Amino acid sequence: MNQEQIENVFEHMGYVYFREKFPFKLWLNGILDEEDEEFFLSFLDVYRLEDDDAYCFDEFLYLLRIYQYICKHNDLPVFYF
């Protein structure tokens, strides 16, 4: 994802503070280079973060990496149990 796509996802989900502060840092970090908008939308939908300055970028990045790891390594079949 590029910086503009990240901004659009934040705007679509209503995260004004994150849209102003995090897109350049996320793009520069490169964590979303291999991901698409659907992944990022699902992350924001699952975590439902509060849109204020309570989160620093490192905390946001930590949550995103956890979600990315879970999605990547979730190889269980549908009827596993």
Image (spheres, rainbow, N blue to C red):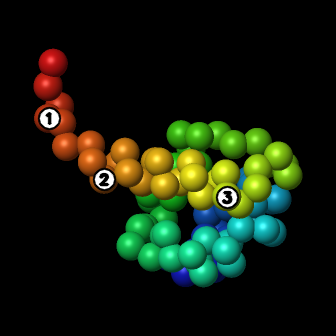
The numbered dot on residue 58 is 3
**In the image, what residue type sits under mark 3?**
Asp
Q: Residue furthest right?
A: 53
- Pointers 1 and 2 in contact (C-beta within 8 Å): no
Q: Residue at x 38, y 73 (%)?
A: 34
Q: Residue at x 79, y 68 (%)?
A: 21
Q: Residue at x 48, y 65 (%)?
A: 37
* Residue 12 is at least partly visible in this image: no
Image x and y of residue 41, in percent? 53, 54
Residue 33's place in the image compared with 54, above or below, is: below
Q: Residue at x 14, y 35 (%)?
A: 77
**In the image, what residue type sits under mark 1?**
Pro
Q: Which quadrant of the structure image shows residue 79? A: top left
Counting residues from the start of the chain, the first of labels 3 and 2 encountered is 3
- Pointers 3 and 2 in contact (C-beta within 8 Å): no
**In the image, what residue type sits under mark 2?**
Lys
Mark 2 neighbour density, 10 Å: few (under 14) some (14–19) many (20 or more): few
Counting residues from the start of the chain, the first of labels 1 and 2 encountered is 2
The numbered dot on residue 77 is 1
Helix, strand or loop at disc 3?
A: helix
Helix, strand or loop at disc 2?
A: helix
The residues bearing labels 3 and 2 have C-alpha atoms spaced at a distance of: 21 Å
Residue 17 vs residue 14: left or right? right
Q: Marks 3 and 1: which is nearer the front?
A: 3
- Relative depth, front residue between 8 and 30: 30
Helix, strand or loop at disc 1?
A: loop
The residues bearing labels 1 and 2 have C-alpha atoms spaced at a distance of: 14 Å
Query: Which residue carries the number 2 mark?
Result: 72
Quarter of the picture holding the C terminus: top left
Counting residues from the start of the chain, the first of labels 3 and 1 encountered is 3
